[in-house]
Amino acid sequence: MAIDQWLLEQHQAGIYPPVLRFYTWASPTISLGYHQHRWDSAWQQLTWQGTPVELVRRPTGGRAVLHQGDLTYMVITSGLTGKRLDAYQKMCGFLIQGWRSLGVDLHYGSAGRDYIRNPNCFGIATGADLVTANGYKLIGSAQLRRGDAILQHGSMRLEPDTQLFEQVFGETLSYVNLPIIQEGDALIQTVVEVLTNAAADCFGVELVEQPLSNEEWQRILRQSSLELGSPVGDFGKGTRGRGS
């Protein structure tokens, strides 16, 4: 997510135009919200299939997200007016349109501020999140505003490992049967292509693929990462908040 933050800075400085980005994670990772100080200290010793589970802090708010079997999207733009929830809904329009074309109807969650009591982002759905008809939270999103510029990114749960999810959050992960026959990389490619086309249509723009240059990669790598800090109280497997 250091790339996301760097791209926001470039956009804010007028160097980069609005950006749409999709990515997956090289290894299982838990990303903490920028202001999240309650999390289980045991997360720092977790492993999955012999691989350590990484722990990072996002530049955006919200609760912890387990990145495994998911697809992350990111949008950077500026000039949006209205309240924060209005901006979420304007930026999430392409997600709703794209997933509808894949056979999945999504609507916004309705939970209030109680989500701050739950360390798990996907434990509850707020008005910034997208859920299926049966209440399964498919996409959790968060924002960062810098002046007139907005960074919004979120996680789409495509093929999560239910055992790892329960190990992290102490909660059973409900299952959703996506009406898409592909799996793995093929599934991700299909979703990315559909959502890219939906974004071009919703935002009325022509999207141009632009890989980062070697020089830009070096600048990103020189950035200091956000400090994790120490957990203020543990949320063990027997302890759950009342919201998310």
Image (spheres, grey):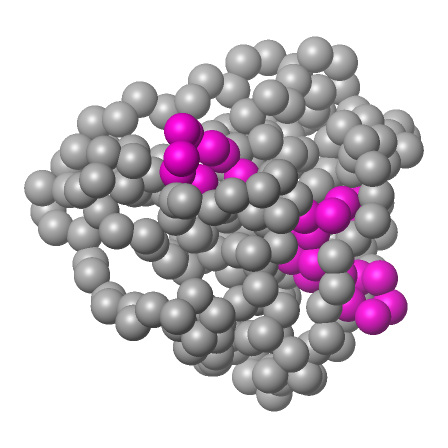
Q: State which quarter of the image contains the C terminus.
A: top right
Magenta extent? 122-151
Residue 124 found in image quarter: top right
Within the magenta stretch, is there residue 138?
Answer: yes
Instruction: State left or right for residue 236 relative to residue 220.
Output: right
Residue 121: horizontal and vertical position, in percent? 70, 41
For the residue pair 134 and 120, the one nearer the viewer reads as 134
Within the magenta stretch, is there residue 202?
Answer: no
Residue 238 seen in render: yes
Residue 168 seen in render: no
Instruction: State left or right for residue 31 relative to residue 111.
Output: left
Residue 201: horizontal and vertical position, in percent? 44, 75
Q: What residue appears at the point 26 percent right and 51 percent down from the top-left corner?
A: 17
For the residue pair 45 and 129, the one nearer the viewer reads as 129
For the residue pair 104 and 202, the one nearer the viewer reads as 202
Q: What residue appears at the point 39 percent right and 44 percent down from the top-left corner?
A: 78
Q: State which quarter of the image contains the N terminus.
A: top left
Residue 199 found in image quarter: bottom left
Q: Residue furthest bottom?
A: 181
Q: What residue appears at the point 60 percent right and 21 percent down from the top-left corner?
A: 35
Relative to 81, residue 186 above or below:
below
